[in-house]
Image (cartoon, rainbow, N blue to C red):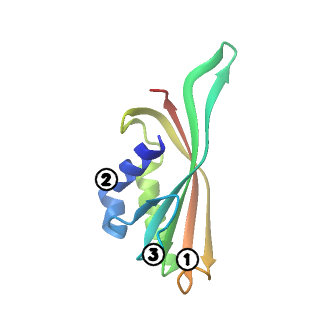
């Protein structure tokens, strides 16, 4: 699902209008141009019900929207939210049952290339196993 999510976000016109192709899995490259989005997987676990292991997988991911200004970081986060919030359907090869937004926070990152603003979101994706 992680690579499917990355591909899904990379194909979203609303998001790419703001960050172009600067959507990175896990690590922002040295010397990267801003604004950008970083996608990291926090947890990838199954769902166990009374009958044992179910076919539904829960994947927790974070998105970090990083820009020169807080307004720009929040605008990028709004584009990520528009792309993901409540999504159901195919995401790459996986059938997504639900995407939920668990938390949002914004911070200033003084150590990032002269100081940048970051709007972060914690997401949970529920999807079926392949």
Dot 3 alpha-carbon crowd within 10 angstroms: few under 14, some 14 to 19, many 20 or more: some
- How far apart are labels 1 and 3 at the CA level? 8 Å
Q: Position of residue 81 (x, y in %)?
A: 47, 55
Q: Which mark is residue 5?
A: none
Q: Which image quarter: residue 47? A: top right
How many badges with numbers are in the image?
3
Q: Position of residue 117 (x, y in %)?
A: 55, 77
74 lies above or below 68: above
39 relative to 82 in the view: left or right: right
Which residue is tagged 3?
Answer: 72
Which residue is tagged 1?
Answer: 117
103 relative to 39 in the view: left or right: right
Q: Position of residue 60 (x, y in %)?
A: 59, 45
Circles 1 and 2, Cβ within 8 Å, touching? The answer is no
Circles 1 and 3, Cβ within 8 Å, touching? The answer is yes
Which residue is tagged 2?
Answer: 11
Q: Camera-side residue: 62 or 13?
A: 62
Q: Residue sitting at 42 percent across and 54 percent down?
A: 82
Q: Which image quarter: residue 24? A: bottom left
* Quarter the C terminus occupies: top left
- How far apart are labels 1 and 2 at the CA level? 24 Å
84 relative to 49 in the view: left or right: left
Instruction: Point out the tag, 3 or 2, that comes first from the N-terminus.
Output: 2
123 lies above or below 29: above
Q: Secondary structure at mark 3?
A: helix
Q: Secondary structure at mark 1?
A: strand
Residue positioned most to the front: 30
């Amino acid at each position: 699902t992680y690579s499917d999510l990355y591909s899904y976000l990379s194909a979203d016109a609303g998001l790419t209008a703001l960050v172009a192709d600067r959507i990175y899995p896990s690590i922002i490259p040295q010397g990267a141009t801003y604004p950008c989005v970083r996608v990291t997987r926090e947890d990838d676990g199954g769902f166990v019900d009374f009958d044992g292991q179910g076919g539904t997988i829960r994947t927790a991911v974070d998105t970090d929207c990083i820009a020169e200004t807080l307004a720009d970081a929040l605008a990028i986060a709004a584009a990520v939210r528009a792309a993901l919030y409540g999504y159901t359907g195919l995401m790459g090869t996986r059938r997504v049952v639900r995407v939920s937004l668990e938390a949002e926070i914004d911070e200033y990152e003084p150590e990032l290339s002269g100081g940048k603003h970051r709007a972060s979101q914690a997401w949970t994706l529920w999807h079926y196993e392949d």
